[in-house]
Structure formats: structure tokens, C-alpha cells
Image (cartoon, coloured by chain):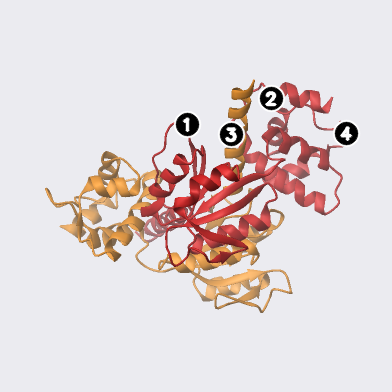
Chain colours: A orange, B red
Amino acid sequence: MWYNSMHDSSKKQIPQATIKRLATYVQVLQNLNRENVEIISSEPLAAACGVQGSQLRKDLAYFGEFGIRGLGYPVKNLIQAITSSLGVDHEWPMILIGVGNLGRAMINHISFHSKSFVIKAIFDCDPFKIGETVHGLEVRCTDDIKEIVQNLQIMIGIITTPPERAQRAANHLVNAGLTSILNFAPARITVPDTVQVEYVDFFNQMYSLAFNQTQQWKKNVF
Amino acid sequence: MWYNSMHDSSKKQIPQATIKRLATYVQVLQNLNRENVEIISSEPLAAACGVQGSQLRKDLAYFGEFGIRGLGYPVKNLIQAITSSLGVDHEWPMILIGVGNLGRAMINHISFHSKSFVIKAIFDCDPFKIGETVHGLEVRCTDDIKEIVQNLQIMIGIITTPPERAQRAANHLVNAGLTSILNFAPARITVPDTVQVEYVDFFNQMYSLAFNQTQQWKKNVF
């Protein structure tokens, strides 16, 4: 019944907003699992994820009938069902281009926090960095990207270069046949329609906070 | 004329999307400035920022008449004008709560990349971390947040805790009087309407990439 409902659900169109919330649900559930929580009802789970209970139940309904009425969701099974439906119950080999300060931070952070998303190789075009070891990975020349992507069956490329080198990094990834890019560089990149790019722009978000706070002060002063 | 136009523009409502793009423009311009570029026309500047020229010109028009007709934008003046209009030409003292792997990464990265956004104090509730020094900052007990925020005139709080501790961290920040929060924890937080929260969710974005790529494979296989 479990697997049947998942199988049925694979035909439904799941909204992107739901997909992104599911990542949070899985992370919260994994924390509960580590604390040996076996069953959790929707309201405390929703609260821990910072969403409304109704939102959580609606999101999980895309995957079939998970809950045990009157008891709640079985934590381990729910993790397995969501990650399997999303395709993140297996390893996603990734590469990272740009081994500067941000790149190093992300190599450490992603390795620490995720079993599914695994950085397999790291690249830089700076000859002074090539050959250096970061978190157990040797920095390689960007010329080798295509070969490594094919040999290691890489699926996602991460860009952590300075903004002016982001497009060149994206070209390398696209040229190597990758269709999924996570871009931390503060620059927009141009890629074919078949390639999905996700942007992580937290300096832009800090600008937004600073600007809005400045506007608030002006209102209060004048 | 420069300052007059900026003064006039302060009455216009600048869209949030423009504000966020301006952060990218400033970062690209700062790179150009470091390379001693003095003047740049809108098309190559737009290309470097990864936006259309028309978009760039429209965004900059909110701040008055910047360009020198037939020549382009004077790089240094444009940086000064944008950062001054946004209120990011002065220091924004920040604190960070949650000195785990992600927190350490962000302390390093933000210190390296920004002169405006400066982390002044860092906090954790883990007694084993309190007293430790990270990037020159001593990890302090979360009980001290309110006092430090007031003494150091902190303006932005950054949350890098695990998801289940994000709400408690947010409560500390709100209780200390902060109204701007950048949340890296994969959890939604509840705050009063007067507080702006920006979420940085890159694991969610990786889930989205993985899910969409899985869907693509299914299409190609079945």
C-alpha cells in the first residue's frame, strides 16, 4: 500500500514550492530520527518545520496516504518515502568549480550535512591552487571537467567562483553535459533551456535587509 | 547634480527585485574597480552582471541620471551612488547564532567578501563551544545576545543553527530588538510583522535540481 501510493503519485505534477519544502521536512525528520522519535503527528512536525499543519498535510498528500490515523507519521518510513519519491535516496555525485573562500566553505558544509549530495571532485583555474587538497579532495584543472564528469557520472555542478568567472564555469559544466547547476556566484549565467540553474544569493538578501531597514529609519526620522 | 538626483530618487518606491540585483551590480563594479576600469557602458556591464542591458538601465534609472552619454557609467561614482542610496556605504554590524559547520563557513566567507557587512559577535548555546575563538571572535553564550546587540548597535542577526533551534535563535534576536534576520537554517521561523526575514535554502534548491533531473530521466526512459 505504501509503495503503491507512491507509484500512483509519480504521475501527479508536484509544485516546485512543495519540492523545496520537502527538503526541510526531510531534514527535520532526520533530526527526529536521530533523537529516536518513531512517530510524530502532523501539528508538531509542521511546527518544527515552520509551516502550518494544513500546508504539511497538503504537501505530503502528493505522495499518497502516509499518516496512521490518530497516531501520526512513522518517521523512518516517511523519510524513506519522500527521499525515494524525490530521487534523493541515492547518491548525487557533484563537482564544484571555484575553490576560493566560499568554495572551501561549501565543500565542508555539504560534506558534513548531506549523505545524498556528495562532492566528488573540485576544480579551479588558478595554477597555484591546482594540486592542493581540500577536505580530502585534490583541486584539479578546469580543463579536466568533461572527462571527470563522464568518468564519475556527475549529475550536479556547483559554481563558487567570483562573479566574473561564473559564466566560464557554467560553460564548462554545460559543455561536459550537465543539466543541473547550483550557482553561488553573485552573477546571472546564460545556459541552454535544457539546463536548470538555481541561484543562491545571500549578499543580495543582506542588501535587501539593509535597504529596508534604512527606509524604516528614514520614515521614523522625517 | 549627482547628489540632487539621488535625493529626489529617495522618494520613489524601488522594487525589492531591483534592490537584490543592485547587490550583484555593486559586486561586479567593485571587481571592475579593482581591475582599474574607470568607465563602462551599459551593455558590457549588463553582460558581466548576467542581465539584459535594458534591465540594467531601468534599475539604475531609479537613482537618477548616472551615465555619461556616449561613454558609459563612471565605475567609482556608480558604486558610491548605489551603496549610498541603499544605505550600505557604511558598516552594518551583525551577529551570528549557531557556530556549527555552516556558521563557521559563513563567518569566514562574509568577513572575506564584504566590508559593509561585519560580524561583530558570535553565539552558541553549547557550553563546549562557548569561549572558543573562531576567525578572531569569541563564541559567547546566547544569554548575552540582548546586551551585546545594544552595546555594539547590532543591526542584522544571522541564524546558522540546526533547524530545530532556529525558532529559539529568532526569539533571541527579536527579544534583543533586531528587525532584520538572515536565516540559513532549513526551517521557517515565526516573527512579528515588523521583522524582515530572508531565507537562504540551498539544500532545498539541491532537492529541486535532483527531483527535476529524476523527472527528466523518467520521461526519457518510459
Q: Residue at x 42, y 52 (%)?
A: B186
Position of the C terminus of chain B, as image quadrant, is: bottom left
Q: Is residue A93 visible?
A: no
Q: Which amino acid does label 2 sit on?
A: Ser
Marks 2/4: CA–CA distance = 27 Å
Do the dots labelled 1 and 3 sit on one chain? no
Are tags 4 and 1 found on a single chain? yes
Task: Determine if marks 2 and 4 fall on one subunit.
Answer: yes
At label 1, which amino acid type do we have?
Answer: Thr
Whether callout 3 and callout 2 share a subunit is answered: no
* Picture coordinates of residue A60, whole percent (x, y): 27, 48
**Horizontal arrangement in the rendering, residue B87 relative to residue A68 (left or right):** right
Which residue matches tag 4? Answer: B70
Q: Name the residue under label 3.
A: A213
Judging by the rendered image, the residue that carries numbered circle 1 is B194
Which image quadrant for residue B14? top right
Which of pointers 1 and 2 indicates the residue nearer the eye?
Answer: 1
Residue A98: image location, x then y, percent: 64, 64
Camera-side residue of B196 and B205: B196
